Image: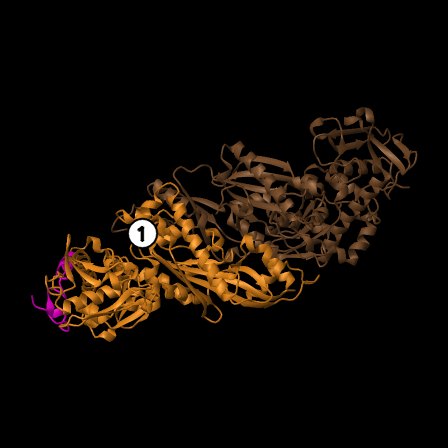
Chain colours: A brown, B orange
Amino acid sequence: MPIVKYISVNAPPPSLQDNSADIDRLKNALRAKVPGFLVVPFAQMSNVAAGFRQAKFSGTAVVNEAVGCPESRRLAYLELVDFIREPAPLAAMALDLGTTHLEATLLDLTTSKPLARANRENSQLQFGEDVLSRIHYAARPGGLANLQSAIIADINYLAADLAAQAGLPSALIRALSVSGNPTMIHLFLKLDPANICREPYIPVLNAPDLYHAADLGLCLHPAAPVFVLPSVGSYFGGDLIAGILASGLDENEHTSMLIDVGTNAEVVLGNKDWLIACAGAAGPALEGGVARMGMRAGPGAIEHIRIKPGSLTMSYETVGGQPACGICGSGIIDLVASLYLAGIIDLRGKFRPGSDSRLHETPTGLSYTVVPTADAANNRAIELEQVDLDAMMRSKAAMYAVLTTLISQVGLSFADLEKIYVAGAFGRHIDPERAVTLGMLPDLPIKTYVPVGNSSLAGAEKVLLGSHDRQRCQQIMQKITYIELNVNQEFMMRFSGAKFIPHTDGSLFPSVPIMNE
Amino acid sequence: MPIVKYISVNAPPPSLQDNSADIDRLKNALRAKVPGFLVVPFAQMSNVAAGFRQAKFSGTAVVNEAVGCPESRRLAYLELVDFIREPAPLAAMALDLGTTHLEATLLDLTTSKPLARANRENSQLQFGEDVLSRIHYAARPGGLANLQSAIIADINYLAADLAAQAGLPSALIRALSVSGNPTMIHLFLKLDPANICREPYIPVLNAPDLYHAADLGLCLHPAAPVFVLPSVGSYFGGDLIAGILASGLDENEHTSMLIDVGTNAEVVLGNKDWLIACAGAAGPALEGGVARMGMRAGPGAIEHIRIKPGSLTMSYETVGGQPACGICGSGIIDLVASLYLAGIIDLRGKFRPGSDSRLHETPTGLSYTVVPTADAANNRAIELEQVDLDAMMRSKAAMYAVLTTLISQVGLSFADLEKIYVAGAFGRHIDPERAVTLGMLPDLPIKTYVPVGNSSLAGAEKVLLGSHDRQRCQQIMQKITYIELNVNQEFMMRFSGAKFIPHTDGSLFPSVPIMNE
């Protein structure tokens, strides 16, 4: 059942012989059609009663399945929030609440079809670029309130945008689901995030109850239930639970893996019987975090690069075909893999002096000109410096170390995996073959890798549509084992071994040619 | 279990090995001590988490038994609303929300003892004297909002008074129960009362859910649950359900009767197996509604009167011993019964010309001087006119007709009754013997009559203290059969027969002397 439902009601009008109260009459008419405990929130009572009378006791009741996570299986607790004569599309908003970017879908819950899509930069960026700087800002007087108002304003703006596209007032958006990392969720709920980044890394809460939109200052229907996907811990958020929901990892017979690369590389391994997860700081180089030239996969970002070995001729493609203004995660992987295959960098990820005319000296070492000033947007050459390469090598090593640590924890090898789901912009754009060349992803048949797009948003959509998926959130929370890599010795060893292309142990990557010194 | 409970918690502090979120940790610690589904309202989340941390994970959790009426038996649904180090007395406010008067008790829910009492005139009186005039006022633009703000302001004033007496801030009043007639409850909840007084007499709701004090604009703890005693119909309110709770009528083995005289005479008959009720417009003469001289049982009201047959010497007592300024319901009954026994009025309730020197002619007929100007407060003589007597005769006839109609419905006679509980100021002050003389109450042994005081308030106190009594509300609602006297032919016949002192059929009142013409 969707989180909000229209239920048609045809109640007998009152008489001296049948003189129950309006709201009791409506509840009675609904009792045959919906199971469970029915309440009318105080703020909706007048409206519900007036709507029921105006419609002459026949029309459509709007009922929220007000099932709090994580105890949703234990009771059916329903809210009666509106009564209307002519139902509009039953609109609900799914939101991926990212640290830098918000992405939303407006769904019609009766048809399960999208009515509109919208996205927007997170305007909390004015208070801090990343999660840590926002946590610090939140500790200032008024800081938390500023961060929360910023995100609420963003969501209201998105809601208005979606509603306008669908030809509805925002007040007819009747539910919201939110998927985000634990810090974003704390800021959204105006909860102090201070302890998330202090040992022992304790969030205020992992499993939010259900709230009303009006409680949060959201300009949706005031009684719209707000379903926040639960977290497992400070470093494993609802966005990952959403990814598991979207990939179906937790329901597969065979063991699969889900990789989500954002600021952290977050990885889940498992099947219908067990789930294990970990996260590592692998991301910055992969999501626009590389010094100067990095950017998100937006217009003008280089997303694919080839360098022909021998002639060393370079070709590239940008997002939207626009003049190049930077390079995104998938572009960097392509670039570094190409540089390796063309013999321009060695297996330690260092430029080989004199190997290419594009290399030139700078005060901080060698630098490689990807796009010269003349060809670049904004007259700004795109350069790859040695420090960028070093950051990339650390990121790719961290990623591989995370994956191997995780798989070894359960006594499996990569060959046992049926699928590796790759989430996010990273998954949509990268060429898995190049990531394998770099030794970032394991050397498996390319068809093992399945891009799953914005799985945080896809999971948020799912929980609006079905109670089964809302209940899966809770099951996943309870089933998952989280490994803290910050305190894991084995991880550090594996990390050192992975700081070569493709790896110190070349036998792990039979498909990758070893380029001798 | 009381509606709010303190639960002491001693949770282990978080560590890397035990890193569940603060609120989840608190919920887990409580799960062993309270059964059921636990949620934290959005508005309380930050406070609960901060309190738990400040108390170093050991202290007192405040849990509301958020059990909505009428489905309370079906689930245990609990709210976690506060966490404190040093608990203050667990204060909760019980309120009798009368049309003219508000009476409240502040209870300590841990000891079940009263902490304070207070009362206040209903400031809705400025908008209309009685229920009907308020319903009309509510239909004006802004009328309902004015009526609701007036009553909320009154309750906030009472809460501040109670809290000051108990040495607490109002914000530490952690629950409220409200007992009142259906119109008062509609105005309290800002629900349109228009259909209450129009055939077929349909309230917006009979069985309110549980609300938070903040929803209603009440200055108590914002999450204080507001429990409103349910109504049975437009003419049988939560004040009567409270009376049944207080008298125990619904749990007695033997059949008893409860009489509550306010603006209406409301009567319930029954035992643990069945309950039957009705109401009739019997009240005005009995509750200060008699023209000019009537008043509530406040200071200076004549509450007892004797006239010595023969000498016709009169003696009276006023409330508080103050100079007489009016006459209350019990005083009127005494007066009319005395006038009858002294031969000053006949069995039709008409003054006998020349029977007493206190009688004198007025433009509207004979009048009897109860207190001459010289002895009265405010230099205003207290007079009983023929029109007042006529109103009194109608009231007493209506009362007796209500009682006989009800008892005949179930094939019983008055002699089958174990007890007759008499509620309200009427019950506290009247001399049942005099009411029997008048033929207002049946001629039963005087010990049958049990005054139960303000049973509306007593019932409101009970529901704060025990879940059993909250559940009884629902059971009473479901069990009770309500008879509509407005459409009852038999009632009209009985009413005519009762317009004599004591009755047209004197054999019904063997203890009352028949005063011949």
The residue nearer to you, when weighing A483 against B478, is B478
Tell me where residue A109 appears, x and y as whole percent. Answer: 49, 41
**Magenta stretch?**
B492-517
Image quarter in which the C terminus of chain A is found? top right
Q: Nearer the viewer, residue B498 or A223?
A: B498
Going by the numbered disc 1, the residue's amino acid type is Glu
The x and y percentages for residue B384 are 20, 60
Instruction: Determine which quarter of the picture holds residue B24.
Output: bottom right
The residue wearing badge 1 is B129
Whether residue B159 appears in magenta in the rendering, the answer is: no
Q: Residues within 10 Å of mark 1 (few under 14, many from 20)?
A: few
Relative to A61, is A428 on the left or the right? right
- Looking at the picture, how far across and down is residue B327, in whole percent? 26, 62
Is B226 left, or right, of B380 in this rendering? right
Q: Residue furthest front?
A: B374
Query: Above or below — where is B346 with respect to A95?
Result: below
Chain of the residue that carries numbered disc 1 in the rendered image: B
Label 1 secondary element: loop
Q: Is residue A419 left or right of residue A169?
A: right
Whether residue A239 can be seen here:
no
Q: Main secondary structure of the magenta part?
A: loop
From the viewer's perspective, tell me whether residue B149 is left or right of residue A235. Answer: left
